[in-house]
């Protein structure tokens, strides 16, 4: 209970402070510092234990990160543990409407996707391609939403595959097990001091494929991530 009180006493002021730093900053360096500092502070306050293996990845490579999504707690996890890379979330447009935090996401140039307007959505994907080509790694939740069932992954959406194939950057599949125990979808009260595992799978070379192979890539990615996720849950 004391850990829970401590976490919530820190969460709001930390989020407001680092969001305001981002909103009033002008440089990518400040954006990156604020995001990773906020992520680390939130994780420290949570009292969780972390088992992280990103050894399959090259810190000097630009990727299209594909990560399973279970909880809002995924956000600070990724800001902290993927801090060696300059990355941008590719997220639904409504997230950017959140007071303060959403404005900070927009100010830091994370990528908004309009799911209700297919024409604008394709323009947003093209913008994400340009971001990738500038050296910033797009990060996508291929399930498209937070998964309420921790036993298996949701079916993947096609948009992330189109992005990866267009920019011809390697896909870096990353799996997380445990964030849903900290903060389940639909709940406001967290459960601190959980164990969380994060593992990167070997990247997928997209230069061997064209846009015509988007379904093939999606099926392959779903297959390898499903298999690795099941193994991680039972280890």
Image (cartoon, rainbow, N blue to C red):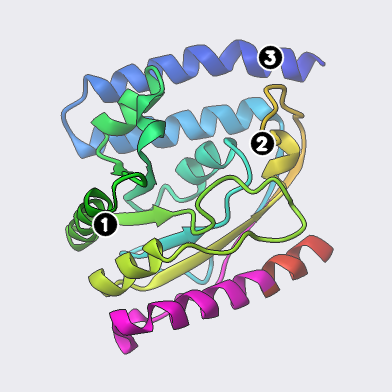
Residue occupying image coordinates x 77% and y 57%: 151
**Magenta highlight range:** 197-226
For residue 49, above or below residue 126: above
Camera-side mark, 2 or 3 = 2
Q: Quadrant of residue 35?
A: top left
Residue bearing the label numbered 1: 125
Q: Disc 2 versus disc 3: distance between alpha carbons?
A: 21 Å
Vertical arrangement, residue 4 with respect to residue 186, above or below? above
Q: Is residue 214 left or right of residue 143?
A: left
Marks 2 and 1 sit apart, C-alpha to C-alpha, by 26 Å
Q: Is residue 215 magenta?
A: yes
Given residues 53 and 233, the one toward you in this image is: 233
User: For residue 52, what is the image quadrant?
Assistant: bottom right
| Residue 214 locus on image (x, y percent) | 38, 77
What is the tally of numbered marks visible in this picture? 3
At a point 75% along the width and 29% down the height, the residue shown is 192
């Amino acid at each position: 209970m004391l850990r829970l009180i401590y976490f919530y006493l820190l969460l709001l002021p930390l989020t407001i402070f680092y969001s305001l730093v981002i909103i009033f900053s002008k440089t990518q360096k400040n954006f990156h510092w604020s995001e990773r500092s906020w992520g680390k502070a939130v994780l420290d306050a949570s009292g969780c234990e972390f088992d992280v293996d990103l050894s399959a990845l090259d810190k000097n490579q630009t990727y299209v990160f594909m990560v399973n999504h279970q909880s809002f707690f995924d956000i600070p996890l990724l800001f902290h543990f993927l801090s060696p890379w300059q990355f941008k979330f590719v997220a639904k447009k409504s997230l950017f409407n959140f007071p303060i935090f959403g404005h900070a996401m927009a100010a830091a140039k994370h990528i908004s996707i309009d799911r209700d307007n297919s024409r604008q959505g394709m323009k947003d994907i093209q913008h994400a391609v340009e971001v990738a080509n500038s050296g910033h790694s797009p990060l996508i939740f291929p399930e498209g939403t937070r998964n309420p069932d921790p036993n298996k992954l949701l079916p993947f959406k096609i948009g992330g595959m189109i992005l990866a194939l267009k920019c011809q950057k390697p896909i870096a599949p990353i799996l997380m097990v445990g964030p849903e125990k900290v903060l389940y979808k639909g709940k406001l009260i967290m459960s601190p001091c959980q164990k969380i595992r994060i593992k990167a799978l070997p990247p997928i070379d997209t230069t061997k494929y064209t846009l015509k192979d988007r379904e093939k890539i999606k099926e392959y990615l779903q297959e390898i991530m499903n298999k690795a996720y099941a193994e991680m849950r039972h280890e």
